[in-house]
Image (spheres, rainbow, N blue to C red):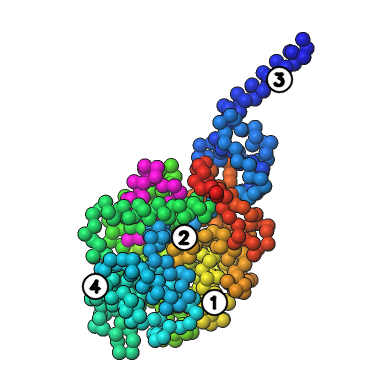
Amino acid sequence: MRLFISFLISIVSVAAMVSSAGADSADLALVNGKIVTVAADRPQAQAVAITGDLITAVGNDEEIRSRIGPNTRVIDLHGKLAIPGFIEGHAHFVSLGMSLMRLDLKQAGSWDEIVSLVESEVARREPGVWIIGRGWHQDKWEAVPQPNVDGLPLHDLLSRVSPDNPVILGHASGHSCIANARAMAAADISAESVDPEGGRIVRDDSGEPIGVFLETAMDLVYRARDSLTANRTYEEAAGEERRAIALASQECLSNGITSFQDAGSSFETIDLLRSLAADGALDLRLWVMISEDNERLAEKLADYRITGEGRNHLTVRAIKRLIDGALGSHGAWLLEPYLDLPSNTGLNTESLETMRETARLAIENGFQLCTHAIGDRGNHETLNIYESAFADHPDKADLRWRIEHAQHLHPDDIPRFGQLGVIASMQGIHCTSDAPWVPKRLGDKRSAEGAYVWRDQLQSGAILSNGTDAPVEDVDPLANFYALVTRKTSDGVAFYPEQCLTREEALRAYTINCAFAAFEEHLKGSITVGKLADITVLSKDIMTIPEDEIPAAEILYTIVGGEIKYQAE
């Protein structure tokens, strides 16, 4: 009888435990792992409980197992690393998707190889169809093309293999392009064409365009392409954009990215994103900068302050501007001439007067201003504009305005980021991708003192956030993380390694700092109770393994709001 009573008591106790767990049980639990939380109060744990789209508990296995009920999905991590979901801090969302639908030139080792790729594409297309590609970079080719102007190829070979198809091939940076004769004819480009403000048509000694267009001059040929596709219906255009959004989402989720800071979209694209967010059709979280001229901003800005739409899947609260171009195309605006092109100091792509008006619109409407600035002059002028706007509005505080890229700085401007509270939104992978040719552009002294000076910026009090600038680079957090902590190029040489970040600093730059740079640190960026359940699980512990093993790590799970959006096969 005593044994029977004891048995009944144990049954009642177990039932009470299950009932208690069922009432308070998690929807998803990650157990038996190494959880790096990026939270100061508990930097590491074993397990996480998630209910709905929120983190409800962080602790050891015993603590979390008490929250496991009959309907809880349990993932045994088997000791694998879980971190806050990667936040892509600066990239181009729709462009990333579009790039996956176009000719990829990133791996081409020569101009001849690119011409061959276009020739193959022409064979698959009907005459008259536009062929669009992207990803070439003349400094990454095995040899300088012959003939050339400033190292850039002439269009003749390209035009010869594509006589009946207009072709536009975008530079990897997105700041120049090459067009064939058919595309230039569609754009009415000739020796008499005038360079637009903030751009340049590259010409040979006789004044004839060679087919290369820098900065705002690209609009001349892209506008011709757009005019010929203008007869598409809204449904056709939106359908292509939806496909690009779907492809970009898949690419990001497979790379462990849970949030994406989009570096510039039109009001029309934002309208589409807003409708998708309202329908629950966005698989990752988007924080979007508006890319429009001042006239349209003044007209529409008040209607486009969007916060947390679609269960925190869409926020719009920043404006994007470009003050200069890219270093690779000699478009970055420099204080002193390029070493390899002494007649050139780069391009100011948006007038300072226009920039100051954008700053006024931003600060008076409660928007962040995010300015693309790569050259030291571009950064210097941007900081001046920001400082003036802040001084004119002393009642405005904690603005978190950003400089996107902040690649090449004059030493005197490095401490100004921390002093002004300006966020350096940089891209680690640009450093190692560009390193082989940066000294050729700037010289050793300028490169050492101001090129990708992350350590100096941190020590001066700046907040660093990090991204890839995809599709300029692959949207690959692990290659980017590796670049941050090693600054090693493909041949294993470290580019001014004294500027490396520690792994902890690199992880913060890819998580909580990106959240802070978007006023979202209360929602994401760390594995903390009450925050959104956005978590990435990796096959290797990138915080401790030998650094050269970091790129070989794989994404095992990408979890957004407690939902498994990607799982490795």
User: Dot 3 lies on which element?
Assistant: helix
Q: Is residue 109 magenta?
A: no
Disc 2 marks which amino acid? His
Mark closer to the chain start, 4 or 3: 3
Cα–Cα span, label 3 and label 1: 70 Å
Cα–Cα span, label 2 and label 3: 57 Å
Q: Which residues are magenta?
A: 269-292
Q: Are marks 1 and 4 in contact (CB under 8 Å)?
A: no
Cα–Cα span, label 4 and label 3: 84 Å
Disc 3 marks which amino acid? Ser
Q: Within 10 Å of the Cα at label 2, are there few (<14), some (14-19), or many (20+) other Cα atoms?
A: many
Say which of marks 2 and 3 sits in front. Answer: 3
Along the line of sight, the residue nearer the viewer: 409 or 261: 261
| Residue under numbered circle 1 | 436
| Residue under numbered circle 2 | 90
Residue 186: numbered disc = 4
Mark closer to the chain start, 2 or 1: 2
Residue 10: numbered disc = 3
